[in-house]
Image: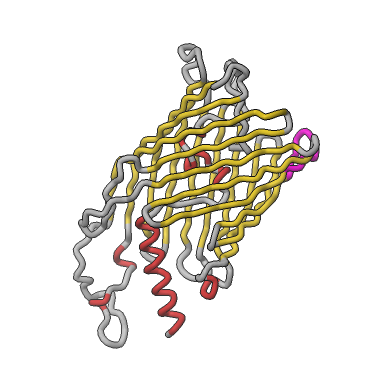
Amino acid sequence: MYKKTALALLWLGCLKVVSAQDIHYSQFYASPLTLNPALTGINDCNYRLAGMYRNQWRSVTDPYVTPSISFDINNVLQRWIKTGVLSAGGLILNDKAGTGELSNMSIMASVAYARPLTADRKLNGSVGLQLGYVQKKLDFTKLLWESQFNGESFDPTLSSNENFNDKFSYIDLNAGLYVSYFLSPKADLFGGAAIFHLIPPKESFLNKDNKLGMRMVGHGGFRYKITDQFSIIPQVLYMTQTKAQEINLGGSFAYVLNNDVKLFGGAYYRLNDAAIPVIGIDYKQIRLGLSYDVNISSLSDASKGRGGFELSLGYTGCLGGFVLDKPIFFCPRY
């Protein structure tokens, strides 16, 4: 009985959080268009394809599954844009959470403009906007209600006595800034800020006037090349939305085996929530990353420390005929 009650309370708490706040990735640096619209087009060459998959809380309830895919390209309209670089991109995300299969389907389009901010081109900036369509759904037939309890057990054939809509949708608008400073061939500084839900949308299955709060994001770090083969990249991520906040601290290292292969690994700590080991490999233009959230919060009694598995896969490519006279941005494979 204790376990059933604990799981029920956990589900109700998680439902409240998910319906009121946004998704997040532990490998935030591998999902640029969910991190900051200003990162659109900032990559190692011309275009980038990025995929993410997250599976969380399988040990305590129906898992929260969050796949997404994004594509972005720089030097758009290069014949007309003579100063700086115009970039464009798109993102599709489909988050599904818990017993009621609360889903969040988001289709977003991004545009960003980047240019050098100093004559020596060491300081560069980018500004981005993101506009899209969001639909959220909840399968109420998979939930149990107080009115369905007959004194001994739940009878799902009884009415819930609730007046609800099983889905709603809205138009969403996000914006961001990003800067990068080239200190030397061995060191770079980078950072950005973004605001999501600039026009707070109404979110309610029960015909209530509930607004999704704006999400504020700050992120940054630096890269230091210790040797020609070995580099370190400490990073920090801060997010706040309504009364919730997330602080993610940590870093990774990169080790170059040869011209085609680079290994990387590291660890992050999400304050009061999880320790996150990360490993991965770059092979030519492909990057594969794996991470796992080791739960250390008060939920660890129920989760046994098992949090979420996450997979990232990215490809960065070049197109012939593109003018590559663009700002010098550093990004850890954004």
Residue 168 at x, y percent in the picture: 27, 50
Q: Position of residue 224 (x, y in %)?
A: 71, 38
Viewer-closest of 157 and 231: 231
- The residue that appears at 27% across and 87% down in the rendered structure is 151
The residue sitting at 52% across, 27% down in the picture is 125
- 26 on left or right of 216: right
Seen at 53% across and 75% down, the residue is: 301
The residue range painted magenta reads 254-263
Q: Quadrant of the N terminus?
A: bottom left
Tell me the quarter of the image containing the C terminus.
top right
Q: Position of residue 250 (x, y in %)?
A: 63, 51
Horizontal side of residue 70 vs 319, given as left or right: left
The image shows residue 333, relative to residue 302, as above or below, that is above
Main SS of the magenta part reads strand
User: Is 200 drawn above or below residue 183 in the view shown?
Assistant: below
Number of numbered discs on residues: 0
Q: How is the image coloured?
A: secondary structure
Q: Residue 161 or 35: which is nearer the viewer?
A: 35
Q: Is residue 261 magenta?
A: yes
Q: x%, y% of residue 295?
A: 56, 65
In the rendered structure, does residue 37 fall within the stretch colored magenta?
no
Image-quadrant location for residue 8: bottom left
* Residue in the image at 25% along x and 75% along y: 157
Q: Quadrant of residue 161?
A: bottom left
Horizontally, residue 134 falls left or right of residue 305, namely left
